[in-house]
Amino acid sequence: MSPTTLARHLLESSHPGTADPDLRLLLETVAHACTRISSLVSRGALADILGEQGTDNIQGEAQQKLDVIANDILLDTCSWTGCLAAMASEEMPDIAPVGPAFRRGSYLLVFDPLDGSSNIDVNVSIGTIFSVLKLADGRDPATAQEADFLQPGSQQVAAGYAVYGPQSQLVLTTGDGVDAFTLDRDTGSWMLTTRGMRIPADTTEFAINMSNRRHWHTPIKRYIDDCLAGTEGPLAKDYNMRWIASMVADVHRILNRGGVFLYPRDQRAGSLDGKLRLLYEASPMALIVEQAGGAATDASQRILELTPQALHQRTGVVLGSRNEVDRIRQYMPDS
């Protein structure tokens, strides 16, 4: 039997959502944009994409050249599909409505065009995160506005990410499990390589930026200290720590072998609400992780139940192996 392409997989999916040809086209188009980004990433300095752009994004963070290029690729590639009313990106202060030159559809696309920007110049895995929402019934696509995007993560129609590493892989859920596709660079096609990814319920690995320890709230400090105490501590097992500084890469590892990823709220002025963006990072990854049998919280509450109040709202994130996420939740004062 010949390998299954992403297009064929979506056509043959039993999930009702993928029966909509507009959704299938949109997901295939996002995948094509990721193919273009993957090609640029693989060329690095040869494509003149390394280094800073000289501008800041809406969060005041310095943009890398590839941040801006990837953002433009997704906007340009997806605008013409006829499936979208508007798009929103971590790199843009406002939404980008689809203009009158193109047919408009009922879907909304949100994305972090280049996750792990600090790794671009040192040739470490980076990625693209995306999520698909739908306009409320009766809403005119021509009048899409920011409020249309402020939906709880449980209402996502689809979510996925591409990780650009030794192989480029696309991980996707439409609400019926999680599948992984590998980019065949010879044909430019995404080929199905793993069906039904499952995260082990138990783990001895955690991923956290230890340099922020002095800023953490006490419950997170207690949990990490208990992990570091090993078999002689209260958790009675030895843990390993992993940290790639790219959420895509860390989550991809967890999907393949288990673990927990923590980016908690802390006591710094800019991190009181958390660091990661609810719409562009936390909600899409939470849907993927839950569909793979894991759990995703803000340390206390299920992320998919959070309704954003603003386009660039931040949140704390604890996700991964279900039993370990539940254990961390027990450290919280309201548990």
Image (spheres, grey):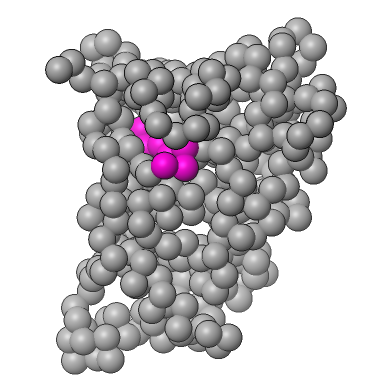
Whether residue 64 is visible here, answered yes or no, is no
The residue at the point 36 percent across, 32 percent down is: 170
Quadrant for the N terminus in the image: top left
Q: Looking at this rendering, what residue extends furthest in the left direction?
A: 1
Residue 187 x/y as whole percent: 27, 10
- Taking the image as shown, residue 30 lies to the left or right of residue 79, namely left
Q: Is 90 contained in the magenta span?
A: no
Whether residue 197 is visible here, answered yes or no, is yes
> How many circles with numbers are drawn on the protein?
0
Placement of 25 over or under 249, stated as above or below: above
Placement of 55 over or under 61, stated as above or below: above
Residue closer to the observer: 93 or 278: 278
Residue closer to the observer: 73 or 175: 175
- Taking the image as shown, residue 226 lies to the left or right of residue 211, namely left
- Taking the image as shown, residue 45 lies to the left or right of residue 2, namely right
The residue at the point 52 percent across, 32 percent down is: 17
- Taking the image as shown, residue 75 lies to the left or right of residue 183, namely right
Residue 306 x/y as whole percent: 64, 60
The residue at the point 29 percent across, 65 percent down is: 201
Residue closer to the observer: 14 or 105: 14
Quadrant in the picture for residue 210: bottom left
Q: Is 173 contained in the magenta span?
A: yes
Placement of 78 over or under 295, stated as above or below: above
Residue 72 x/y as whole percent: 59, 22
**Start-end of magenta stretch:** 170-176
Residue 57 x/y as whole percent: 66, 41
The residue at the point 40 percent across, 24 percent down is: 10
Q: Looking at this rendering, what residue extends furthest in the top direction?
A: 101
